[in-house]
Image: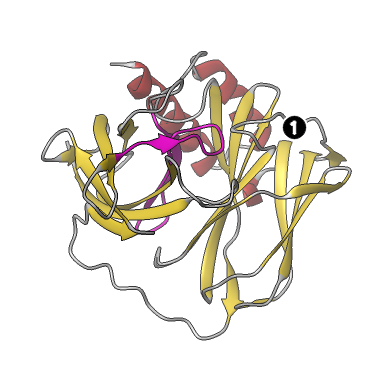
Amino acid sequence: MNRCDRHMLNRLLVISFWLSGSTGAFAQETAGRLSPPGEVICGYAGSYFAIEASRVQQGLSVQLLAGEAAVSQPVPLRFRVSQMPQGTPVDDLQVEHEKLMHVIGVREDLGAFLHIHPQRAASGLWEIIHAFTNAGRYQIWSDIKHRGTVYSFAHPRFTVAGESLATPRGTIPQLQDQKGGYDISLVPAEPALVAGRTNSFEVIVRDDSGNQVGTDFFLGALMHFVIVKDDLSAYRHAHAKEHWKSGRTVSFEQVFPQPGLYKIFAQFRPQKTKLPPDEAILAEFWVRVSAR
């Protein structure tokens, strides 16, 4: 069992505690005991902990505060970071991948995606004004780092009003995408993806002339991967294995917790791109994961 396998097994053990109704403090202490130190190539470095935000009764908490939202209308999204049950504001967040907070969101059909970064507005309060470009029901996760541990909080779903257009999935697996004048290919190392073990991938980016191009760093990584199961029961935020220099091929590894259909969102900046510094291309793929 390699580092990625051990790390993902620890994640699944921790998640099983809060799914069975344990409190946030107990689960957080367990996460710190189980997670191995050091660089983890399949996700974040060091300890990692995932929890459903509404279940936190004790320990670190992030609450999403959002009013009514409508498509194309700016709406404030506020995130209250505190220690429960007292509700004491928490301000000593640590930078992870160049930001103090990463907010990831998908529409229920996985036809819309967002990756945004709130700013501190007051003690324990983080805010960003965001305009949703697609209506529908959304699942939001907030990722923060506190005292050496990264936490992913899954927030209750909310609705963005307006006309919602369904996004067809097409044929699965869907391992090719074309965005921004680039052709992006997801290449699994093995023909079949299997739940519960390490699956290796390469991502190849070609320009409109068919030439393979490398990627520059974006938010501290050569490529960001958000992996979501089609029923939203599994969420992973992973990164390229290559940490120190850019190459023409990006690789990553992932352990899928259960069989089924997964969508992979890949964000990257091609070398010599003319995109603004804070923007990236989003490639989208679908994969099917089988049981052992």
Residue depicted at 19% across the width and 59% down the height: 172
- Amino acid beneath label 1: Leu
Look at the image and say whether residue 216 sits in the magenta stretch.
yes
Magenta stretch: give its range. 213-240
Q: Residue 5 appears in which quarter of the rendering?
A: top left
Q: Name the foreground residue: 260 vs 124.
A: 124
Q: Residue 176 appears in which quarter of the rendering?
A: bottom left
Callout 1: few (<14), some (14-19), or many (20+) C-alpha neighbours within 10 Å?
A: some
Residue depicted at 24% across the width and 44% down the height: 211
Is residue 249 rendered to the left or right of residue 113? left
Residue depicted at 67% across the width and 42% down the height: 101
Q: Which image quadrant: the C terminus?
A: top left
Position in image of residue 201 (x %, y %): 25, 35
Is residue 260 rendered to the left or right of residue 273? left
Question: Which residue position holds label 1?
Answer: 93
Q: Secondary structure at mark 1?
A: loop
Q: Is residue 219 above or below residue 155?
A: above
Q: Residue 129 appears in which quarter of the rendering?
A: bottom right
Is residue 188 rendered to the left or right of residue 91? left
Position in image of residue 28 (x %, y %): 62, 28
Position in image of residue 257 (x %, y %): 33, 39
Does residue 57 appear anywhere in the picture? no
As drawn, which residue projects farthest toward the bottom? Answer: 163
Q: Which image quadrant: the N terminus?
A: top left
Look at the image and say whether residue 113 sits in the magenta stretch.
no
Query: How is the rendered protein coloured?
Result: secondary structure
Position in image of residue 89 (x %, y %): 85, 40
Residue depicted at 77% across the width and 43% down the height: 81
Does residue 270 appear anywhere in the picture? yes
Q: Is residue 181 above or below residue 60?
A: below
Is residue 247 rendered to the left or right of residue 84? left
